[in-house]
Structures are given as C-alpha cells and as structure tokens.
Image (cartoon, rainbow, N blue to C red):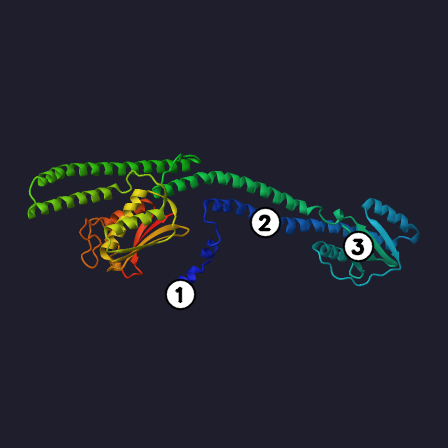
C-alpha cells in the first residue's frame, strides 16, 4: 500500500497540477492562452518548416537555372562577345556579373544555413557534378562563383531572388496580435472574475460572523443568481437565529417570573435548613436558565468590532483568577493583537474555558499567538485531562463525562458546547489536546 501511494504521488497529473494556478482567473486565462499559443506554434512551424522552405527552394531553383544558363553562355560565347552578353543578362536578371579570367576555386567548407544548403544542392544538380562552385554572402546578397572552361564567373544575386524577404515581420505580427488578444482576455476575465471574488469574500465574512455591508449581486447571470441565493440564505439564517433567541428569551422570562415569586416567598420565611436548600435550588435553576439562554443565543445579535485580543485575554484571565485566588493563572503572548470579533461572545467563550481549567487544575497557562491564518488562544491546565477518544464527546450539549475529568462538574453540560458554538460563529473552532502541563489544552482558533 505504501509503494502504491508513493507511485501515485508522482503521477504526471499530480506533478503538473502543482504548477497550475489555483485561482479561477489564472485557470481561465490558461484556457484562453494555451490554445492560442498552440495554434501560433503550429502556424509558425508550418510557415518556417513547410511553406518558407518550399518557397526558398523554388526561388533557389530559379537562381540555379540562371547560373547554369550563364555558365553555358560563358562556355559557348566567343570571347569578344561575352561582355555584351554579360551586360544584357545582368540588366534582365538583376545580377552583378564579374568574370575572373584564369582563376580557379579552392575547396570551400560546407554551408551552415538552411538557405545556403538548399542553394548548393540545387546548383550542384544544375551545373553538374564535375564543375566546381561555391556560395557565400556579400552583405545581404548571395555570392555565387562557378568555374568555366577558362576562369571563374562570379554572380551576385539580390537576396529577394533567393529567399523570402522579412520572415521576421511575420513573427512580429503574430506576437503583436497575441499580446493584444492577451490584454483583451485579461481585461475581460478580470471583469468576470471580480463578482465571484466579491461573493467569496462576502460568504467568508458572513461565516466569520462579520458584517457584509454594501454587497449586492452583479456580473454574469449565473453569478447574480449565486449572489442572490447567498443573500436569501443569509436572511433565512439571521431570521432563524433571531426567532430562536426571542423564543428562548421569552421562555426564560416566563420561567423567571414564578422563580422570583418563590424567592420572595422564601425570603419571608425563616432560615432553617429546608429553606436554605430551597434557596440554593432556585439559584441553581436561575443559573441553568441563564446558561440555556446563552447557548441558544449563540452569536446573538452582537456585531463584530475591531478588538484587542491581548487586552481581552488578560482581563478575562484576571477576572477568573480573582474568583479563585488559590489558583495560579499565567498569561503569555503579545500585548496587542487586533482582530474583528464579537467581543462579549468571545469573552464568554474564553471565560468558560478558563473556568473549566481552574475547576480541575491548580495551575493554568493562557497563551495568545498568531500566524498567517489563525489567531489562537490556548488554555492549559495541570488537571487530570480527558482521554483522546472522549474529547469530542465533551462538546456534546447537556452531556457530562461519567469518569475521569468532569468538565462541567456541577453545571449543565454546556460550557464547552457554548465555547465551540461561539468560536464556530466566528469561522473558527475550539479543539482539545494534551497540555504541556500534563492536563488538558483547549485552544480557540479564529481566522484572521
């Protein structure tokens, strides 16, 4: 199995995927640019390897035929008439002709360029294998020297007679048009991707419990439909949370009314053992109602605001330590760390975790830190901890652990449930792990 996974990790598809852009804009741009580049590559290959080569050979064939004709005229024309013949052919064919009387041609190295190779091959076929010749360049023109029976005939042919002029212009036109099309594609794609990016940011902010001011659907029809669906979903969620909170607030109010009457009735009684017990039960019922309402309220109607987490952590830890002076609470981390959160809700979340730690340990460390993705508030204690297999079970609402560490001892079983609910309303989470002190580590992770 390990070998199979290792080979799969090096599959060509996964290897290529590492270098592909992850964003919609980059991928859409590749979809447009890749076919255009491929098409231009094919066209360039066809032009240079097929059309340009064929055209060059046709032109070289014509020049080679002219050279063969001029050599034939040199060999067959009397010496007194050759100057006149050369002048006539130079005017008609646009060649510059020079005759080197009694000269011979030394061995010449093979040509290097494609055009020179083609020209040599065709001239060799035209003038015959027993006649020496050489090709070269004079500036942009082609210099062709062919041996005759009494010397060497030098023929200077203009470049446009041998090869196609300005193939670089073709490349320039292709690159220029490609850049223009690329600029148009980038502008068009940016305008199409921008509404999707705004929708993603709005959904992300809403998931973190932050306001989404001024967001409205725009862009392509499909993007408008998605944005409108998001707005409808947000309204339904907010309405559901508001209705749940209002309902449970009403229930809490209705229940507290008879409890208040009972407290007043007990206040008129004496202070015997039974009355004291009833007073404790009523106080416990009121506290339970408050916790139920806090759990049902969740994020409530509180708006996010820019908050100094360093100050919030220190104040919360100090308040919890003051309630239990026999415990030791240490706070470490930056003095100031600004983040947009729901201040009251996050304070309640942190208070629950610190109270649980103080309830089951004598030493508590609260650490604030931040990286590129998350701000983390870790609460560690030296208590008995929770077995790894039962850590998720501790987050269940109205649930108490039966053995080991009882995180909600004497409570309603909502401390960790409320903390996780608040953290998730900010787009984060609460996770449990083993503490360096030997007990439990509860970390609030909030996206930055």
Instruction: Kindly give the residue lying farthest to the right in the view shown.
Output: 80
Residue 415 in picture, x, y percent from top left:
24, 49
The secondary structure type at the circle numbered 1 is: helix
Nearer to us of marks 2 and 3 is 2
Residue behind mark 1: 3
Determine whether, in the image, residue 145 is placed left or right of residue 413: right
Left or right: residue 285 compared with residue 421:
left
- Picture layout, residue 216 above or below residue 295: above
Return the disc, 1 or 3, that comes first in the chain's sequence.
Answer: 1
Q: Which residue is mark 3?
A: 144
Identity of the residue drawn at 39% across and 62% down? 5
Tell me if mark 1 has few (under 14), some (14-19) or many (20+) residues whose alpha carbon lies within 10 angstroms of its own: few
Picture quadrant of residue 406: bottom left
Mark toward the start of the polypeptide (1 vs 2): 1
Alpha-carbon span between mark 1 and mark 3: 66 Å
Question: What residue do we see at 83% from left, 52% from top?
Answer: 70
């Amino acid at each position: 199995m390990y070998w199979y996974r290792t080979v799969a990790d090096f599959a060509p598809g996964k290897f290529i995927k590492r270098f592909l852009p992850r964003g919609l804009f980059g991928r859409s741009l590749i979809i447009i640019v890749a076919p255009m580049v491929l098409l231009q590559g094919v066209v360039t290959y066809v032009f240079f390897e097929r059309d340009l080569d064929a055209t060059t050979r046709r032109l070289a064939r014509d020049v080679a035929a002219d050279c063969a004709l001029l050599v034939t005229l040199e060999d067959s024309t009397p010496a007194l008439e050759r100057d006149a013949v050369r002048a006539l052919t130079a005017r008609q064919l646009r060649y510059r002709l020079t005759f080197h009387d009694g000269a011979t041609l030394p061995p010449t190295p093979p040509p290097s360029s494609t055009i020179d190779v083609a020209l040599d091959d065709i001239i060799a076929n035209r003038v015959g294998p027993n006649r020496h010749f050489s090709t070269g360049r004079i500036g942009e023109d082609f210099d062709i020297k062919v041996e005759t029976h009494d010397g060497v005939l030098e023929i200077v042919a203009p470049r446009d007679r041998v090869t196609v002029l300005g193939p670089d212009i073709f490349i320039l036109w292709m690159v220029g048009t490609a850049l223009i099309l690329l600029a148009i594609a980038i502008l068009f794609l940016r305008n199409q991707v921008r509404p999707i990016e705004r929708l993603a940011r709005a959904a992300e902010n809403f998931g973190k419990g932050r306001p989404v001011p001024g967001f409205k659907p725009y862009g392509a029809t499909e993007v408008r439909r998605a944005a409108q669906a998001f707005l409808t979903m947000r309204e339904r969620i907010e309405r559901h949370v508001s209705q749940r909170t209002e309902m449970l607030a009403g229930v809490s109010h209705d229940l507290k009314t008879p409890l208040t009457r009972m407290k007043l009735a007990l206040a008129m009684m004496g202070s015997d053992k039974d009355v004291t017990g009833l007073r404790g039960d009523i106080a416990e019922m009121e506290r339970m109602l408050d916790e139920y309402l806090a759990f049902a309220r969740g994020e409530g109607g509180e708006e996010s605001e820019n908050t100094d987490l360093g100050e919030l952590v220190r104040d919360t830890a100090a308040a919890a330590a003051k309630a239990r002076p026999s415990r030791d609470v240490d706070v470490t981390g930056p003095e100031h760390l600004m983040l947009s959160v729901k201040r009251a809700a996050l304070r309640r979340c942190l208070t629950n975790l610190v109270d649980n730690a103080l309830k089951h340990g004598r030493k508590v460390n609260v650490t604030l830190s931040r990286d590129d993705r998350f701000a983390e508030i870790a609460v560690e204690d030296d208590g008995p901890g929770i077995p790894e297999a039962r850590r998720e079970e501790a987050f269940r609402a109205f649930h108490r652990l039966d053995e080991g560490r009882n995180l909600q001892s004497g409570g309603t079983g909502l401390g960790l449930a409320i903390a996780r609910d608040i953290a998730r309303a900010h787009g984060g989470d609460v996770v449990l792990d083993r503490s360096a002190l030997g007990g439990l580590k509860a970390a609030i992770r909030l996206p930055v």
